[in-house]
Image (spheres, rainbow, N blue to C red):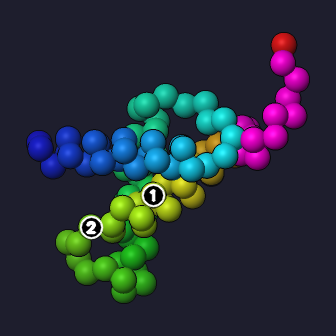
């Protein structure tokens, strides 16, 4: 149980860091941010193991987790139809 809570807490932090680093407005709540962070950590760990950078049971590391979350956040932002350029070209109503 503590492992799951720890993973969600790390995912929340990684997701928040990724949201701060990605330009533009990401319209998502803390739940989706946490899920993006957890999924980004998982993707980074899987890719690191597949490339031989990590051994089984080792964490992917914070930097790789943030990079994985950034990639996933970019994809989620594009699927939602958001702008990651931060240009502000949408007129205000």
Badge 1 crowding class, 10 Å Cα cut-off, few under 14, some 14 to 19, many 20 or more, is many
Left or right for 72, reference 87: left
The correct choice, above or below, for 84 with respect to 71 in the image is above
In the displayed image of the protein, which residue is found farthest to the left?
1
The rendered magenta stretch, by its main secondary structure, is classed as: loop
Asked whether residue 83 is in view, the answer is yes
Residue 30 in the image, given as x and y percentages of width and height: 43, 31
In reply to whether residue 90 is colored magenta, the answer given is yes
Mark closest to the chain's N terminus, 2 or 1: 2
User: Which labelled disc corresponds to residue 66?
Assistant: 1
Q: Is residue 90 left or right of residue 8?
A: right
Q: As rendered, which of 79 and 41 lies closer to the eye?
A: 41
Horizontally, is 90 left or right of 66 in the view? right
Q: Which residues are magenta?
A: 81-92
**In this view of the protein, which residue sits in the foreground, 69 or 1?**
69
Judging by the rendered image, the residue that carries numbered circle 2 is 59
Asked if residue 70 lies left or right of residue 77, the reply is left
Asked if 28 appears above or below 61 in the picture, the reply is above
Q: Please, what secondary structure does the residue beneath circle 1 have? A: helix
């Amino acid at each position: 149980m503590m492992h799951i809570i720890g993973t969600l807490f790390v995912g929340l932090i990684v997701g928040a860091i990724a949201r701060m680093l990605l330009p533009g407005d990401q319209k998502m709540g803390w739940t989706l941010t946490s899920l993006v962070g957890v999924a980004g950590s998982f993707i980074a760990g899987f890719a690191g193991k597949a490339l031989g950078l990590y051994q089984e049971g080792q964490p992917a590391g914070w930097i790789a987790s943030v990079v994985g979350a950034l990639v996933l956040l970019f994809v989620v932002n594009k699927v939602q139809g958001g702008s990651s350029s931060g240009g502000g070209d949408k007129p205000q109503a």
